[in-house]
Amino acid sequence: MPPTYWLDLFTGRTWQEFLEAGAQVSGFRPSKWKVLQKVKVGDVFLCYLTGLSRWIGALEVTSRPFRDHAPIWKDEDFPCRVEVKVLAAVTPETAIPIKDLSDRLAIFRNLKNPRAWTGHVRGSPTRLKEGDGLVILQALKDAKANPVVRPVDQAKLARRPKTFRARIGQVTIPEPPATSEEPPVEPQLATTHEEIQWLLLKLGSDLGLDLWVARNDRGREFRGQRFRDLPRLRESLPVQFDEATNRTIELIDVLWLQGNAIIAAFEVEHTSAIYSGLLRMADLLAMQPNLKIPLFIVAPEERRDRVVDEINRPTFSRLRPPLSEVCRYISYTVLKEKLSLIGSVTQYLKPDFVEQIAESCVTET
């Protein structure tokens, strides 16, 4: 039976520490234990250097998953582990830039924007398609036999993980914007927020769901179509929540409802700051920790990385579960293109359709 190929993420620092420890054990965070148990003896980890965006090694799994806190990595212990043996390993200078394989990897096909492939190398262990795995493994063997030296940005190689250890667990501290001033909103983007709200409301209505639009947005319209004229738009929220919770919920951009149950909540984040919608989502989880609602941040493609960084801030990471584990990202482009493709068959879809087009916001080192 052929092996299954898995993504294994490293920074330059954690890769070096892996080698110095004997290159016999690969580890992951506690949250990855369930996924790691799907890894079998004989499977192959394909090792990817974040920051440099290069493939640096291939490891064969030689044991079942186990938990261990023996020191290997200095910044974090990655206690969910498997034993491995090296099949191929190269240096950062001879590692293979992922874009050198772009014409042969499925993750680069049918991209909605030039950076969409990055969503496939954000967390590990993540299962790779067999064809991609074979291409990467062969490229690594070729690079070991016939190395090609490429310049390395030492600052990127030596950078510490974007996540940091705190009493609440692992968090990220996003870098500040290059300028302290918000960029001006381009005139053609002035109605984008309304457009996305309308699309989400219309989709929910077509799915047979009741709707809620943020109370302060009820008077808005998109291309002459008024939000308040949607036939399934509710005038009041479900009554099972306390007043504080309802005050938060009523300002969320779009809600899909079925009876008294909230099926999904959407915040459309059009501005660079991205904070307002995330704060409402976080407030909702803090006040109702047992509430199981799919949460989505909908934002432009160019803000994907910023959304992920912001959602992993300490403020949101201290929630249980962390906001990054329950809130997913949907790009404007993907939403609009998917809706144009499904056309008149929307009524036959299920509400979890949006989960299939959303991306995880969980980050890895």
Image (cartoon, rainbow, N blue to C red):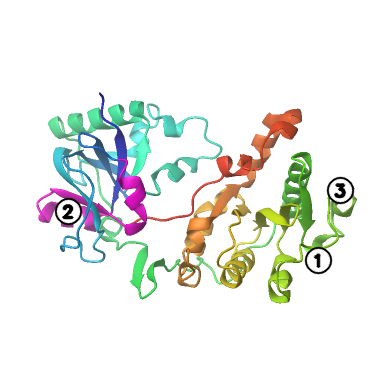
Give percent across and percent down for residue 295.
60, 56
Which residue is at the front of the view, 93 or 359? 359
Kind of element beneath mark 2: helix
Residue receiving disc 1 = 216
The amino acid on which the numbered mark 1 sits, given as a three-letter code, is Asn
Residue receiving disc 3 = 230
Give percent across and percent down for residue 341.
67, 30
Whether residue 32 is visible? yes
Q: Which residue is drawn at 45% across and 33% down?
A: 108
Q: Which residue is drawn at 48% across and 30% down?
A: 109
Residue receiving disc 2 = 18
Numbered label tally: 3
The amino acid on which the numbered mark 2 sits, given as a three-letter code, is Phe
Please check the rendered image and state whether residue 148 is part of the magenta-colored stretch, yes or no: no
Q: Could you give the CA–CA distance between mark 3 and mark 2, rounded to whole angstroms? A: 57 Å
- Whether residue 304 sits left or right of residue 101 in the image: it is right
Q: Name the image quarter holding residue 94.
A: top left
